[in-house]
Image (tube, rainbow, N blue to C red):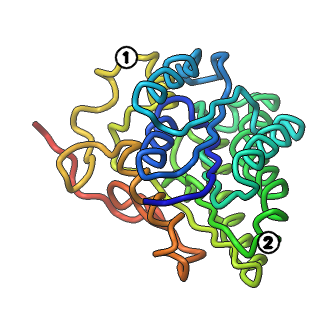
């Protein structure tokens, strides 16, 4: 069992929801937040009431807020909420992201800016808000959610750029705050077929289009938020106190754009 408060951005729907539930099941006091309105290229919306009810029925310690990760005032409110619970913030999971498809020619400047605001400015703002508290308390753990797209994938220009920024930001944070004992690591879900608000949004909500021949994982199925949650829980825990600046694949060879096994044909 773990103890302490952890913040999960984008923690009310999809993979983030499953991460929040997993952490709460393992004893963390979770503050999860997201937006209730539909976001570009995502089906995530109106998710907080159902998650709040599930947490209540299961006796899980999850506090849910509607907040925008790109808003300084919203982040301040989230951090204040977390501090009121225990006076400490032991962990931060930067999961919130949007990922519309498109080349640079297909992506309007305002959409590019919004993708960067959520996917890259958000983790930057969260770090600025949380790190002083972690440093003052003697350390903490941050897990950023990356993507194999961070090394570049076709038709994902803005998303790839934002996730490439996450890899660089994570490394810089790990180096800059080494002596504050703030650990910063990245997890990368991969293998295809993942059911999430973003992936469903890209196919118009049709799960049948998510790729029945996707590589998935060595477990013979796509990765999910519970797989991610188990890895994140370890990285947040004292058992990982000597691990920082690393990238962990949760799925299949997504790290550093390396090769993948052949896709299934049946």
Local crowd size for mark 2, using a 10 Å CA cut-off: few (<14), some (14–19), many (≥20):
some
Percent x, y of residue 195: 38, 32
Q: Quadrant of residue 63?
A: top right
Q: Is residue 175 above or below residue 102?
A: below
Instruction: Tell me where residue 26 appears, x and y as whole percent.
Output: 42, 52
Q: From the viewer's perspective, is 195 left or right of 181? A: left
Residues under numbered marks 2 and 1 in contact, where contact means CB atoms less than 8 Å apart: no
Number of dots carrying numbers:
2
Q: Considering the numbered disc 1 on the image, is that residue within a helix, a strand or a loop?
A: loop
**Residue depicted at x 49% and y 18%:** 50
Residue depth check, mark 2 versus mark 1: number of the one nearer the observer: 2
Give the numbered dot on residue 206.
1
Is 106 on the left-hand or right-hand side of 12? right
Element assignment for label 2: helix
Disc 2: which residue: 135
* Residue pictured at 45% horizontal, 32% vertical: 196
Whichever of labels 2 and 1 marks the residue nearer the N terminus, that label is 2
Q: Quadrant of the C terminus?
A: top left
Q: Quadrant of the N terminus?
A: bottom left
Taking the view exactly as shown, the residue that stands out farthest to the right is: 73
Relative to 77, is 235 on the left or the right?
A: left
């Amino acid at each position: 069992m773990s103890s302490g408060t952890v913040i999960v951005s984008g923690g009310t729907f999809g993979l983030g929801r499953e991460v929040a539930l997993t952490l709460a099941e393992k004893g963390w006091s979770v503050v999860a937040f997201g937006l209730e309105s539909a976001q570009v290229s995502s089906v995530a919306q109106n998710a907080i009431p159902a998650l709040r009810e599930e947490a209540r029925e299961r006796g899980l310690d999850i506090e849910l807020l509607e907040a925008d990760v790109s808003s300084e005032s919203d982040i301040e409110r989230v951090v204040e909420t977390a501090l009121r619970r225990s006076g400490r913030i032991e962990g931060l999971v930067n999961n919130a992201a949007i990922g519309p498809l498109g080349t640079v020619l297909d992506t309007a400047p305002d959409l590019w800016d919004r993708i960067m605001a959520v996917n890259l400015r958000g983790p930057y703002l969260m770090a600025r808000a949380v790190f002083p508290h972690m440093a003052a308390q003697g350390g903490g753990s941050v897990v950023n959610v990356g993507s194999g797209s961070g090394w570049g994938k076709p038709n994902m220009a803005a998303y790839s750029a934002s996730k490439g920024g996450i890899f660089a930001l994570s490394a810089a944070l790990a180096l800059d705050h080494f002596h504050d004992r703030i650990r910063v690591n990245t997890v990368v879900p991969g293998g295809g077929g993942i059911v999430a608000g973003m992936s469903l949004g890209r196919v118009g909500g049709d799960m049948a289009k998510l790729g029945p021949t996707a590589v998935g994982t060595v477990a013979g199925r796509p990765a999910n938020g519970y797989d991610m949650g188990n890895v994140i829980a370890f990285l947040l825990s004292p058992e990982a106190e000597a691990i920082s600046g690393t990238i962990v694949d949760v799925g299949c060879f997504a790290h550093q754009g390396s090769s993948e096994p052949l896709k299934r044909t049946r």
